[in-house]
Image: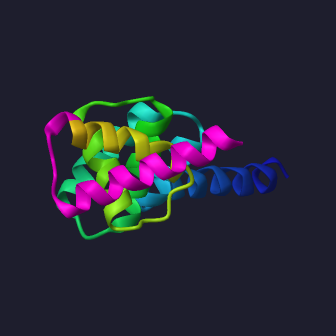
Amino acid sequence: MFQFVLLPILIIVLLVIVAVTWIPSENKIKYLMWRGNYDKARKILEPLLAENPERLSLYRHLAEIYYFENRKDKRALRIFDIILRLKIPFQWRNEIYPLVAKYYISEGRTDSEALEIIERAVEKELIRIKM
């Protein structure tokens, strides 16, 4: 009788262990972010993005991590820049416009892409001030 109760429990535990270890990287990243473990998610995500720069969803996840960590270093700003230029869906798009615009200004960029981002940042700031 005891065997019949223990065996299903053991099978369920093994299935959970196998599922967690075989979860595809992007789902694992989402899970870690959901748990608030941004550091571990970032350590998986950065090399994955370096190997797969064509996977746009990875930029969004990394931008979310950098946003939650309140990062404003060059690496984070480059990811925010990619989010804006490629129009990748990002919940905090309005908040990163000024960060990227300031970065462009500090770099002395005057190309059309930089000017467009700077103009949008100014427009969004004016709208925010009027509210």
Task: Indicate the quadrant containing the C terminus: top left, top right, bottom left or bottom right.
Answer: top right
By secondary structure, the bulk of the magenta-drawn segment is best described as helix
**Residue drawn at the location 25% of the way across and 47% of the way down:** 78
Q: In the rendered view, tell whether residue 74 sits above or below residue 55.
A: above
Colour approach in the figure:
rainbow
In screen coordinates, is 94 left or right of 2?
left
Residue 118 highlighted magenta (yes or no): yes
**Residue drawn at the location 38% of the way across and 38% of the way down:** 99
**Residue drawn at the location 49% of the way across and 58% of the way down:** 27
Residue 98 vs residue 10, the one in the foreground: 98
Query: How many callouts does the rendering have?
Result: 0
Residue 60 highlighted magenta (yes or no): no
> Measured from the top left, where is residue 89 in percent x and y?
49, 64
> Measured from the top left, where is residue 21 in percent x and y?
44, 52
Q: In the rendered view, tell whether residue 37 sits above or below residue 7.
A: above
Q: In the rendered view, tell whether residue 129 sits above or below residue 87.
A: above
User: Is any part of residue 25 visible from this angle?
Assistant: no
> Measured from the top left, where is residue 22 in percent x and y?
43, 59
Q: In the rendered view, tell whether residue 93 sits above or below residue 131.
A: below
> Measured from the top left, where is residue 33 in percent x and y?
53, 42
The boundaries of the magenta stretch are: 106-131
Residue 118 vs residue 45, the one in the foreground: 118
**Residue drawn at the location 34% of the way across and 55% of the way down:** 117
Location of residue 100 (image quadrant): top left
In screen coordinates, is 50 left or right of 115?
left
User: Is any part of residue 71 visible from this angle?
Assistant: yes
Residue 24 vs residue 6, the one in the foreground: 24
